[in-house]
Amino acid sequence: MYLGRGVRTVQRWEREEGLPVHRLAHEKRGTVYAHREEIDAWWASRRLTLSTAEVGESTRSADVSEARTAVPLQRVTWTSVATFWPAISSDGRMLAYVSDGGEDGATPQIWLQQIGGAAMRLTSDRRDYQDLSFSGGDTRLVFTAKDDTGQHVVEMPTLGGEPRVLKRSARTGFVSPDGNWLAYIALDPPGQLRFASLHGGGDRPAAGELVDVSSVTWSPDGKHVVVRAHPDPTMEPDYWVVALDSGAVTNTGVVRRLLQQGYWLIPAAPAWVLDSLVFSAVAMGREGMNLWRQRLDPTTLLPAGDAERLTMGTEMDWFPTGANGRVVYVTIHTDQNLWSVSIDASSGVASGPLRRLTRGPGILGHLSVTRDGRTLVYYSVRARAADVLLIRDLARNSETVFVDDAFNGDKGFPAISPSGGQLAYSTRVAGPRAMRPIYIARLPGDSSRLLCEDCGGRPRQWLDERMLLIETFGSRRNTLVLLDTATGERHELVASPERSVTNPRVSPNGRWITFDATRPGGSPDVYIASLGSSTMIPESDWVAVERSASHPFWSADGTLLYYLPTTPSAELRNTVRARRFDRSSGQPDGDAFTAFTSTEMVVPAIITGVAPVATADQIIFVLGDFRGDIWTMDLDPSSRRR
């Protein structure tokens, strides 16, 4: 279908949003048709215009400009497939991107096309590709490739050919506009920004006062890069500008300003186009992830004026990049919802079709279920209000919004206690310091109490009605910590000097913990460890379950451990694998097997908090159709070189 959507969606758009569809009556059966140019115009206007109702209900800030901007949009691809990491050539005529080509279950590959022309595939192997860019007068592509040996910055001819490694144990490499320098992030030591001369001038570290650098973007003149980083793990990350020649570092404060105004920025690289940073953000109370621009003062490189919203609507706009005054990005329909599938009690394998539990666009996650499997709590930003927690009665298939009169701010990271009598959650604090408060509420209906203003992490799971497992955030290495909700005492439970641990789940009997651990630039691996005491679990006691997998979760009886393989795509997962587990020895038992495969809907592993949960008779997922297309816009058409 031309719009890449199902029949029901298109019929709803015709009925509710004015999709230009024509009907020609006949004696027996009418003809339905549409004109391509009318569809294109409707789609562009839909992306640019907020309805009066949406504007009236939206949360506004005096410091943020949401006036409609006269930025023309052009749709570049029409295949509606899983698409990531677009790159545009310096003359704005060629486009490269990573895509599965519309083949469900296929490993995403690098594709190239002229804008307005057909696409051709450049790669065919089983690697993860990301961070594409053009270099060398658009004659070469530079990208990050990950295989069994780790992540490396690689280049190859634009029209295809033999790849060549530029930097080993490195990622996010981008060549300066003049072709003289490669800026990249080292993996040893991890998270360090480095500049490498491409003409034999050496390789040097930069911005030594910053840690955990996670993205790099060149300024159009090639004199600076902007990175996402922080001066130490106690501070929230922001966009920092680093001068190539002097090494001077400047905090733009862009992220902090928007957080204070109720906007959540996607932790990814912005595009630096003309005088502006362009990035993806979600406005509190809005159903959509849109593109924003923040102009920078040319002298100070600090924000000049208010941030401006570039795209509108309920779609998800992400992966912005740009060149020569033009921005390209991926837009997808945010059909992200809760789904469930029945599981056979004896085999643990899924049986029957997927069943939709929620409807509507938005972002949701952080699923937590009671021990009896009757109550589910999750986080949602689909409502036009503060971010909310929803409590779902799985037996009655109904849900209510968790309301706390003592605290009306946005809420997230929920964890419901095994009995269902307590709820732990956290909230965002929009200050320069990385604060991680945790609130505890008794259910149903009691006011929350603040356990600590900075607990150092977010709730993940209750071990019992007192001890809470939390996960630290904000630094290169996440750790798992036990928190006593009665005394506030905490101690590390799982940590590693080399690996980051995340996605923990405690077994139903409370004796075992599973999690995934990842070395810098590597793939995650799933492990199990004993919870025999409250002391730190040494790495020597970790038992490997599966390589290149993550997001583990237990069956209701604890005899199966499910997880999501990272292949064929680390960003989008469509398969659940499982291994039997001996609850006495703590060892995996038997070979791994496939418990479920989805042909259309996928788990968006690129978003945090999407690990599934299992009850006695079903697995509950966060699933979505994340297929979309690439769009382009001119920020200032009059300034572009032709």
Image (cartoon, rainbow, N blue to C red):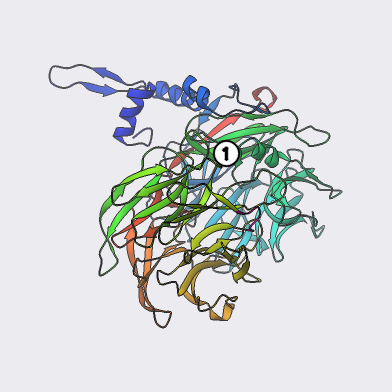
Please tell me whether the stretch drawn in magenta is mainly helix, strand or loop.
loop
Quadrant of the drawing holding the C terminus: top right
Indicate whether 363 appears above or below 73: below
Mark 1, secondary structure of its residue: strand
Residue 78 position in % (x across, y down): 43, 36
- Magenta residue span: 451-456
Q: x%, y% of residue 428?
A: 61, 46
The residue shown at (26%, 18%) is 23
Q: Which residue is mark 1?
A: 94
Residue 227 lies within the magenta run: no
Left or right: 632 with respect to 476? left
- Residue in the foreground of this view, choosing between 189 and 219: 189
| Residue 153 image-quadrant placement | bottom right
Q: Is residue 502 above or below residue 308?
A: below
Image location (x, y in percent) of residue 355? 29, 49
Q: Considering depth in this image, is 353 or 367 the residue closer to the camera?
A: 367
